[in-house]
Image: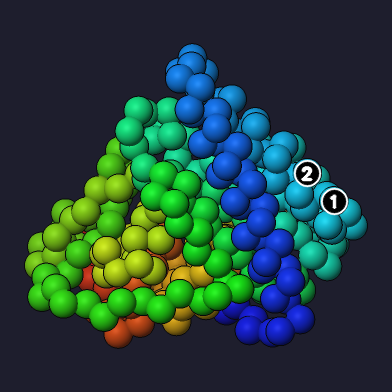
Amino acid sequence: MLLRKEGFRQDAVLARAAADAGGLALTGLRATGSSKGLGERGDALSHQTILGVLGDARPEDAVLSEEAADDCARLSAPRVWIVDPLDGTREYAEVGRTDWAVHVALWSHGDLVAGAVALPGVGVTLCTDDPPTVPATTQRKLRIAVSRTRPPSFIPALARHLNAELVPLGSAGYKIAAVIRGEVDAYVHGGGQYEWDSAAPVAVAWSAGLHASRLNGAPLVYNSPDPLLPDLIVCRPELAAALLDGVASAMAGQR
């Protein structure tokens, strides 16, 4: 779980600055109106921008980024920044879509200790330097954010089991931000993610008091030799037991 230590506050401020810088670069690139290879160009530009900010401030720290070759030296490093320069490349490249994000998180000695998620499309940055307050829910029906392009095969059964409404959204960071911002009650994902897809939004979710774990309830572990981290659930804490039980039941029904 996220360490709430004052000593990491400046790292959180730096995470916010780096995520905002990446978001600003992406917004500027998108505003040029040139759509050819926009996603790929955005990935590269945001990566370079974020690494510039982090390198200037913390040159000794290691970095694990989606847009760079994995340097296994990070496994023995005391501090590792886990970065997704553009979470939701497909959404970013689609005109008018806002459900994409920029992720910057810091792992240190076994824990996520800082994180920021910039949502440039809606002009919001969520960060552990100022933990968000999750709004109280007024909805009677459970709302679950899911991938709009590749939801897990067990999701329809889960929705029936919990009488839940499914809310398709874009990037992982945007979906977790939707839980933090009270737009949905939970996000459930199974398959096809890596540490950079969830580290920063999970850090912010933990700082806001939300539940975040693997689908079987196991802890989310970061800075592993293999950065594959294929499944997770993020939700309001009072819903965790019912959702985990529902996921187990829905997945068992497919066997």
Image location (x, y in percent) of residue 37:
52, 18
**Residue beneath the point at 84% across and 58% down:** 58
Report the front residue among 194 and 61: 61
Circle 1: residue type: Asp
Colouring chosen for the image of the structure: rainbow
| Image position of 55 (left or right of 22) | right
Dot 2 falls on a residue whose secondary structure is: helix
The residue wearing badge 1 is: 56
Circle 2: residue type: Gly
Image location (x, y in percent) of residue 152:
30, 50
Residue 61 versus residue 7 in the image, above or below = above
Is there a contact, CB below 8 Å, between mark 1 and mark 2? yes
Disc number placed over residue 209 in the picture, else none: none
Image location (x, y in percent) of residue 249:
22, 69
Residue 236 lies in what quarter of the image?
bottom left
Residue 48 versus residue 126 in the image, above or below = above
Asked whether residue 16 appears in the rendered view, the answer is yes
Asked whether residue 215 appears in the rendered view, the answer is no
Residue 125 versus residue 4 in the image, above or below = above
**Residue beneath the point at 77% across and 52% down:** 54
Disc number placed over residue 52 in the picture, else none: 2
Image location (x, y in percent) of residue 219:
52, 73
Dot 1 falls on a residue whose secondary structure is: helix
Report the front residue among 2 and 72: 2
**Residue beneath the point at 21% across and 53% down:** 167
Q: Residues within 10 Å of mark 1 (few under 14, many from 20)?
A: few
| Image position of 185 (left or right of 108) | left
Name, please, the residue furthest toward the right: 60
Image quarter in which the N terminus is found: bottom right
Image quarter in which the C terminus is found: bottom left
